[in-house]
Image (cartoon, rainbow, N blue to C red):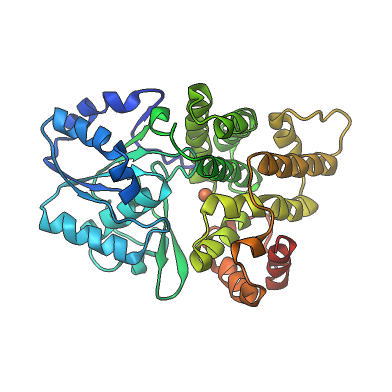
Amino acid sequence: MSVLYVPSTNLVGRGCLQELAPFIEELGFKKALVVTDEFLNQSGIVSKVTAQLAKVDVDFIIYDQVKPNPTTKNVHDGVDIFKQEQCDFIVSVGGGSPQDAAKGIGLVVTNGGDVRSFEGVNQTEKKAVPTVAVNTTAGTSAEYTINYVITDEEREVKMVMVDKNSLVAVSVNDPELMVDKPKELTAATGMDALTHAIEAIVTPGAYKITDATALAAVETIFEYLPRAVANGHDLEAREQMAYVMFLAGLAFNNAGLGYVHAMAHQLGGVYDLPHGVCNAMLLPIVERENAKRDPKKFPAIAKAIGLDIAGKSEAECADAVIDAITQLSKQVGIPTKLSELGVDKVDLDKLAENSMKDACAPGNPFTPTKEEVINMFKEIL
Ligand SMILES: [Fe+2]
């Protein structure tokens, strides 16, 4: 049996935020907790969203203290405000961070307890508070998936939660909210989407629907990500990347991920590094190891990228895919060495151990030993 999780209502495309008000009205709630970060609040993006609430006379209160890697404190502060202000639904505005924090908040409100106890797979009993998730970056798909990641500051660990109760009520992907994103963020989130697509293709959890959407995402990323990075106001490229995020999100939300994410989460947890950058750096390394053991999915990926696969073996296709990923990373300005980002080899043992415990690890096509994980980190140190 295959299960497909997707929010019941999803708005995608240029200007779709301007059409949000009737969907909010339909939900019938009175007061929203708007979960976001300071930058988005000050930049005016949040007010574009709250204008939609005002149109249908829905009250709101803003919590804008979500950190780039959202913390357990962010979740519990948000819960306190939700209760004090007698909110009855959540509107999340942002990339992965506010979306993840909002999922944690929504689940603690309905289930009680501490978000730390939700680590792992489907650890809650009740559905989260209904949430309208407005996405502002094309990459993480957090507004759309059943996964979220919260950093436990005390343990320096990124807790990965996979919880069907965290699925939002309405997702909104309007590329017009993404045009002012800086190049680095566009590159990192776009490479995150590529990682979602490729990990969702090679995982044993893949099936016909996820393969179809993930391969379509790969094709579009190679065509449009360099354009979106080169010129953020290229609305066609931004819109294509919004669809990519949706396609790749649908794939990994239902097929699963693998060791690229398992390892990237640790770098994010210990060094607070951007998720997409860590994924982009690790993607060719992990896929080379995956392809050595089973290259059968790589001809399809090569074809989606637009590479000439005539007469090539599966292993040769895998090499060509890995080269193409490395080239794309270079083209969009992803760093090549972890040591440049402050990663220290003394931490590799802990990073490897925690990678092996990560919720994404079981999705990988093979299970590496601790030494193999350390060696993969070393390749880009
Ligand atoms: Fe990701």
Can you tell which quarter of the image residue 65 is in? bottom left
Estimate the x, y position of residue 128 in percent, counting from the top left: 27, 51
Estimate the x, y position of residue 325 in percent, counting from the top left: 70, 42
Residue at x-position 36% and y-position 63%? 71
Q: How many marks?
A: 0
User: In the rendered view of the protein, which quadrant contains the C terminus?
Assistant: bottom right
- Which of the pair 253/70 is nearer the observer? 70
Query: Height in image: 313 above or below 120?
Result: above
Query: In the image, is 206 to the left or to the right of 6?
Result: right
Residue at x-position 40% and y-position 75%? 154
- Which of the pair 110/85 is nearer the observer? 85
Query: Height in image: 119 above or below 49?
Result: below
Can residue 247 be seen in the rendering of this structure?
yes
Query: In the image, is 235 to the left or to the right of 340?
Result: left
Estimate the x, y position of residue 267 in percent, counting from the top left: 56, 63
Estimate the x, y position of residue 340 in percent, counting from the top left: 64, 61
- Which of the pair 157/201 is nearer the observer? 157
Residue at x-position 57% and y-position 55%? 261
Can residue 111 be seen in the rendering of this structure?
no
Query: In the image, is 113 to the left or to the right of 28?
Result: right
Can you tell which quarter of the image residue 201 is in? top right
Query: In the image, is 324 to the left or to the right of 109?
Result: right
Can you tell which quarter of the image residue 181 is in? top left
